[in-house]
Amino acid sequence: MKCEHCTRKECSKKSKTDDQENVSTDSSSPAQENEEKCDTSKHRVLVVSVCPQSLPYFAAKFNLSVTDASRRLCGFLKSLGVHYVFDTTIAADFSILETQKEFVRRYHRHSEEQRELPMMTSACPGWVRYAERVLGPPVIPHLCTAKSPQQVMGSLVKDYFARKQNLSPEKIFHVVVAPCYDKKLEALREGLSTTLNGARGTDCVLTSGEIAQIMEQSDLSVKDTAVDTLFGDVKEAAVQRHDGVSSDGHLAHVFRHAARELFGEHVEEITYRALRNKDFHEVTLEKNGEVLLRFAAAYGFRNIQNMILKLRKGKFPYHFVEVLACPRGCLNGRGQAQTEDGHTDRALLQQMEGIYSGIPMRPPESSAHVQELYQEWLEGTESPKVQEVLHTTYQSLEPRTDGLDIKW
């Protein structure tokens, strides 16, 4: 018989031929028996983590609800031999919470002599890569040091989950399903992509479109299955998202947190004002005619380039900017919202945006599991381990003189 969770071809072949063998077990020596047994130490546990922005694509693609799409995807992956399928929302919880705290610290430290603001988000690998490789030192200090959801998930899987399962990180092969090709480059980035134990957090990234293509070409019998949790919960967790129009919503959550922590203001509804185009929005907190907080969302490289030009001229009045490389945000990632000729599938994108907006939202502070992990895994919310596991540094490369002339 093949071992439980075994995916090696040798074991599968052995299980098929065991009954055909007509050799008496009494004639086998102990040494021969040990050689024929499957060596479980050579196996790898296959783990797949799915980004919440990928689920609307599968729902639209296969005409399913988000919950049914999640169950169908999980069932298909397990039919391929995947052992565990996780949702990365909990990783985004950590990323947002750490971004919130960092912004408040920067706000208090900011002065004319010590320019800590604006703080720019670091969850988008396309933007971070551009900042590191093209923009360099003038911009790098403004990047939030909180790791992206993908990299936090790598630490959760290769460190926390590995310990819970009594596995070494090398025995886990971790795949992320994401809407964006840049996530593949993020998985290869040194420093950001390693965990406490030195293992690479994400071993492979497949886009939503690549997974859908595999599903369409497969003739496997699939049984819809609930997504697993890192905690072994028996009850199926509902599909939830954060307060972002098409992303993990760092702007909305950081804005509410900053308003409450810095000014004692409790903000329920957030009003986005489109300025120069539909991919550049402004959000302000005002009191007695004074602007207390000024946040912005800059999506797409044209808006990013305009932002950098104004920042260099000292004419950029924002405290915080949510920066995403893709116009219209993560749902428009090229790994899922593109036609065969490489253009945005506008009808599909509009459908995905409608599906995504219908997913129930949850504030990251409301997750009991996250609070438990801060204590059990990270030794407290302000411990040195939090800084080591959930934050990163950036490679300050010299900017290219033609950096703002790149055609995106």
Image (cartoon, rainbow, N blue to C red):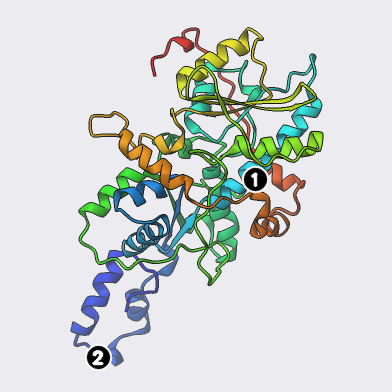
Q: Is residue 402 above or below residue 88?
A: above
Q: Amino acid at mark 2?
A: Ser
Q: Is residue 127 above or below residue 377?
A: above
Q: Amino acid at mark 1?
A: Val
Q: Nearer the viewer, mark 2 or mark 1?
A: 1
Badge 2: residue crowd in 10 Å (few <14, some 14–19, many ≥20): few
**Looking at the image, which residue is at 51% across and 38% down?**
245
Closer-to-camera residue (329/181): 329
Return the disc, 2 or 1, that comes first in the chain's sequence. Answer: 2
Image quarter (top left, top right, bottom left or bottom right) of the C terminus: top left
Horizontal and vertical percent position of residue 190: 52, 35
Horizontal and vertical percent position of residue 50: 44, 51
Residue at the disc numbered 2: 24
Asked whether, in this view, residue 191 is left or right of residue 383, the answer is left
Residue 346, visible in the rendered structure = yes
Residue at the disc numbered 1: 389
